[in-house]
Amino acid sequence: MKFRSYLFISVIILSLFAGIVEAEVQPLTCGPDKASNPFWSLDGDRIVFLSFDADSGNTDIQVMNADGSEKKQLTSNISADIFFSNPWSPDGQKLLFISDRSGAYDLWSMNPDGSGKNQLTTGANIVPWLHGPAGYGAAWSPQGDRIAYTSCWYENEEIRDTTTDGQGNGLESANFSKIRREADIWVMNSDGGEKQRLTTSGSARQPAWRPHGDEIVYLFFRLEGNEIRIMQDDGSEERCLTSVGENVGTFDWSPDGNSITYNTITLVTNATQFSSALWTINADGGHKQQLTYGNLDSSPVFSPDGDRIAFTSQSRAPSSLFVMNSDGTDLVGLAPGYLNFDTVQWSPDGKNLAVSNGKEVYVIPLESPATAGGGPVSILIIAVTGIVTIAFSSRKWE
């Protein structure tokens, strides 16, 4: 009976730890400002990221070496300067960002050293006030000569109401019902010239140019659920890729432009319980494949070679960061104990992941001894001739 008890306990422990790797987590930032949204430069030598200054209440853009050294602030804290998709131009010579420094949220570009700031749009309201940035933003064309972006319209003075308190003092507050959510996809030259509106539905968000192609995908917002749609970069030949009701959250192109990975949000039992699964679909709408089930998985990102997908999860403790093959096999959780990662980006060589928990930026080497199964790994789980055993590494426990 002792043997059966020990074997049962071993199987339980295996189910808890199998597929989890204690990857080496290297912090690149260390307060006091909150760091987020890391993106690698084309050569992999630098990382640009957002830094929130609690004193000023503004978000600025900074750049640092890939090892966290030589941090440099590129924008001043007198305005809100942000990005939510890759800001690097394909040649690495420009950064694209959203700023309210002109009095409204518009698109700007600058050199990677912070010089040469240039306003590209006027009155586009890229991120509507109080509406939040989710789903909005801009993307470079594969050649870097054009930019696709979301433009919104509303009147600031129409969304505020004035009331009085018990002492007769006037109180100003936002009336959320008056905020207009209309948005459409536009394109322009990289210098801001020749702007062209591509959609007219008022429900288009999050444009992303097809790699090596002349098509643009975007999210079409509707009550039944968000769809992925694709069109030519002149707005013609628009068609749906995903089904009505799938409710797509985020998506990412494969590097070869042949497929898209995305997550769908599904109501499980009631208005407070959801699941989010990962899928892939070909650019022509064919070969749709579900990769994960029954969890809260999101933010899938293809590796540079297209063979793997990294994503975050809110339901797979003890980790929130995972990597799997692009067909959904060989799922591996990284960095157990780090439960709050919400963004992940591959290095250009595919050997590292830059991640953030909304407070700090970290790098996880995927080819370090930790992820390869040696060195600092605390617990290794192996099967020997069908009998589960547990082997502890030689590292001392603190």
Image (tube, helix red, strand yellow):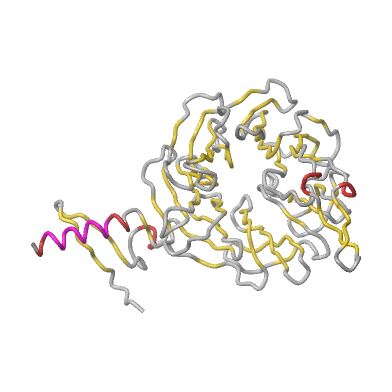
Residue displayed at 80% across by 64% down: 76
Give the residue drawn at x 67%, y 37%.
Answer: 142
306 w.r.t. 74: above or below = above
Which span of residues is magenta-colored? 4-14
Q: From the viewer's perspective, is residue 5 above or below residue 40?
A: below
Foreground residue among 97 and 181: 181
* Residue 7 falls inside the magenta stretch: yes
Left or right, 183 with respect to 36, comes to right
**Is residue 37 visible in the rendered structure shown here?**
yes
Q: What residue is at 70 percent from the left and 64 percent from the top?
A: 52
- 208 or 346, nearer to the observer: 208
Q: Going by the image, does 49 lie left or right of 384?
A: right
Seen as rendered, the residue at the extreme front is 166
- The image shows residue 170 at horizontal and vertical percentages of 90, 62
Q: Is residue 226 magenta?
A: no
Task: Kindly give the residue lying farthest to the bottom in the view shown.
Answer: 398
Chief SS of the magenta region: helix
Quadrant position of the C terminus in the picture = bottom left
How many marks are shown on the rendered structure?
A: 0
Q: Quadrant of residue 53?
A: bottom right
Quarter of the image with the N terminus is bottom left
Residue 303 x, y percent position in the rendering: 50, 45
- What is the x, y in percent for residue 19? 34, 53
Q: Give residue 160's position: percent from left, percent from top.
A: 86, 52
* Residue situated in front as seen by the camera: 119 or 224: 224
Q: Residue furthest left?
A: 1
